Image (tube, rainbow, N blue to C red):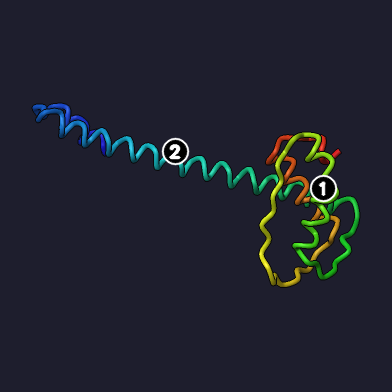
């Protein structure tokens, strides 16, 4: 709702409050939508940063050892490595992995560090990655 529409509605005589109420609901719905879109943008930027940062740091340390990797297997190994931290922090960790994913080309250690870093950010336990 534009500013001019708000002014016009405010000048109209109240029709049992129905007209104003309808416009108020529309404005609230539009504000809620803008808030969701803004939050989604911030979340996207945060995830992008969280993934790119460890990848850039890893690229500087050692050359990647490229191999064909099973993504589900890599995730399972990270879950197994983090199991004690998950239990100690009383975090319920559940995985729902897709079946029959194609193999991906990459460095297994880098992939696992990205997965672990993502879990670290998600659950706020910076001890996982230490």
Please give the label number shown on residue 12: none
Residue 63: x, y in percent?
A: 89, 59
- In the figure, 36 relative to 97: above or below? above
Residue 50: x, y in percent?
A: 70, 45
Q: Which residue is mark 1?
A: 57
Q: Is residue 72 or residue 117 the one in the foreground? A: 72
Residue 99: x, y in percent?
A: 68, 68
Q: Is residue 130 or residue 96 the one in the foreground? A: 96
* Residue 23 falls left or right of residue 90: left
- In the figure, 60 relative to 104: above or below? above
Please give the label number shown on residue 35: 2
- Quadrant of the rendered image containing residue 17: top left
Residue 52: x, y in percent?
A: 72, 50
Instruction: State the quadrant of the C terminus.
Output: top right
* Residue 79 falls left or right of residue 6: right
Q: Are marks 1 and 2 in contact (CB under 8 Å)?
A: no
* Residue 43 falls left or right of residue 130: left
Q: Earlier in the sequence, mark 1 or mark 2?
A: 2
Q: Is residue 57 or residue 127 the one in the foreground? A: 127
- Quadrant of the rendered image containing residue 42: top right
Residue at the location (53% across, 45% down)? 41
Instruction: State the quadrant of the N terminus.
Output: top left
Helix, strand or loop status at disc 1 = helix
Label 2 CA crowd tier, 10 Å (few <14, some 14–19, many 20+): few
Helix, strand or loop status at disc 2 = helix
* Residue 14 falls left or right of residue 60: left
């Amino acid at each position: 709702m534009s500013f001019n529409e708000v002014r016009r509605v405010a000048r109209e005589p109240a029709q049992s409050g129905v007209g104003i109420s309808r416009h108020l609901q529309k404005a609230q719905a539009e504000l809620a939508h803008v808030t969701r879109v803004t939050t989604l943008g911030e979340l996207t930027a945060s995830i992008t940063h969280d993934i790119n940062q460890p990848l850039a740091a890893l690229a500087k340390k050692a050359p990647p050892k490229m191999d064909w990797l099973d993504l589900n297997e890599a995730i399972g190994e990270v879950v197994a490595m983090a199991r004690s931290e998950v239990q100690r922090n009383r975090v319920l960790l559940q995985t729902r992995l897709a079946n029959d994913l194609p193999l991906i080309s990459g460095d297994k250690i880098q992939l696992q560090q990205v997965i672990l870093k993502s879990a670290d950010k998600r659950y706020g336990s910076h001890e996982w990655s230490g």
